[in-house]
Image (cartoon, helix red, strand yellow):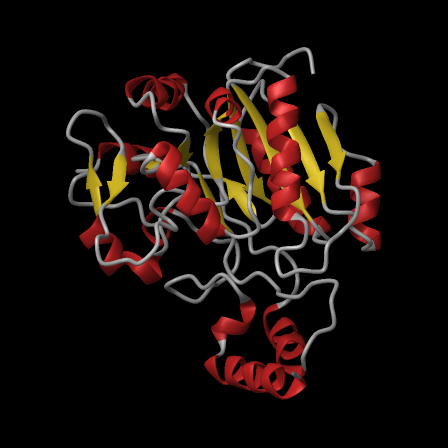
């Protein structure tokens, strides 16, 4: 860990998706040089994931939760708290939180670093900055609610009719200002909505990068490592279980991202990122949603199982 820059630590939250985790870590090491990288594993019991964790790439550390929880999110939020406290003990200024089904898609350069650090300097109350591309399925809504700040190159969302600040003040994938969270005695709660509510009160709105560098992979298998319904298993059979990786952005794609009119053209994933295999557009982020008929069958199976 001697090559670590003090301004950023990276934490990847993992459970039973070894191939996805390996892809996420490889993308970080390919595009983010000289950062500390940690896998925060939720006690994976999948053999492939355990094999990967036993032989992590050089420079990648491992933190493991005490026990996997059976709730919808597993132990994610407890693990995020553990990562935050670890980052504080390492005296990290900023911590990038990613999940194993995400990928870093381009290099960060000096301008990106200056913009990220400058955001937190310019907004002394802010604690979160979102580094992800926007989803094409929500493009029309995002065009309406996403605006460039008057005095700094960053987006904020203005969504007055929304009943809660989820996606406005907080998201589970973010760049976090570690000292500010610790000073506020921040504790991750079990759910994005409740975390957004406390973030809104403590820190106000979350910034969103004009030039993002990471994104969810499309069409990720669901309920990996759990009992699958017939519909989920059928979706896996039709779409496969391996990550549909993004190609790293080319210099031309990066130039198009950074030279666009940011006030009118949002950074939508489908406009800048290319997958290795064909993917339904706009991207869908769960395999079951690729096939509406399978989703209906799956929902019915869940209903009758209760």
Q: Quick check: 234 above or below 179? A: below
Picture coordinates of residue 52 (x, y %)? Answer: 79, 42
Instruction: Identify which residue is drawn at 72% across, 60% down.
Output: 70
Q: For the point 49% across and 78% down, which residue is it?
A: 291
Who's the residue at 22% across and 51% down the image? 145
**Residue 36 visible, this angle:** no
| Residue 237, quarter of picture | bottom right
Q: Nearer the viewer, residue 256 or 291?
A: 291
Residue 288 lies left or right of residue 136; in this view the side is right
Residue 271 position within the rendered picture, expressed as x and y whole percent measured from the top left: 32, 51
- 259 left or right of 164? left
Quadrant hosting residue 2:
top right
Q: Position of residue 238 (x, y in %)?
A: 60, 75
Total numbered labels placed on residues in the image? 0
Q: Give the answer, above or below, for where 59 lies relative to 101.
A: above
The vertical placement of 182 against 18, above or below, is: above
Specify whether 36 is left or right of 132. Answer: right
Which x, y percent locates residue 275?
Answer: 48, 53
Residue name at image x 47 percent, y 45 percent:
195
Q: Is residue 116 visible?
A: yes
């Amino acid at each position: 860990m001697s090559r670590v820059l003090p301004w950023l630590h990276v934490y990847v939250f993992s459970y039973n998706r070894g191939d996805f985790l390996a892809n996420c870590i490889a993308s970080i090491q390919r595009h983010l040089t000289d950062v500390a990288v940690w896998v925060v594993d939720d006690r994976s019991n999948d053999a492939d994931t355990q094999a990967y964790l036993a032989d992590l790439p050089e420079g990648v550390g491992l933190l493991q939760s005490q026990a996997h929880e059976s709730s919808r999110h597993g132990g994610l939020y407890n693990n995020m708290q553990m990562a935050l406290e670890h980052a504080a003990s390492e005296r990290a200024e900023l911590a990038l939180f990613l999940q194993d089904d995400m990928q870093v898609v381009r290099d960060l350069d000096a301008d990106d670093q200056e913009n990220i650090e400058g955001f937190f300097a310019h907004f002394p109350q802010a604690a979160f900055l979102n580094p992800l591309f926007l989803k094409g399925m929500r493009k029309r809504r995002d065009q309406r609610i996403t605006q460039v700040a008057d005095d700094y190159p960053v987006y904020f969302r203005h969504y007055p009719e929304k009943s809660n600040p989820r996606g406005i003040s907080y998201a589970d994938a973010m760049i976090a200002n570690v000292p500010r969270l610790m000073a506020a005695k921040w504790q991750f709660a079990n759910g994005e909505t409740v975390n957004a509510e406390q973030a809104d009160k403590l820190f106000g709105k979350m910034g969103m990068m004009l030039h993002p560098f990471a994104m969810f992979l499309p069409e990720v298998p669901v309920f990996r490592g759990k009992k699958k319904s017939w519909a989920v298993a059928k979706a896996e059979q039709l779409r496969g279980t391996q990550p549909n990786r993004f190609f790293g952005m080319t210099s031309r794609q990066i130039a198009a991202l950074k030279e666009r009119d940011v006030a009118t053209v949002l950074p939508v994933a489908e406009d800048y990122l290319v997958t290795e295999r064909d993917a339904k557009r706009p991207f869908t982020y769960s395999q079951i949603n690729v096939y509406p008929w399978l989703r209906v069958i799956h929902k019915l199976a869940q209903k009758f199982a209760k």
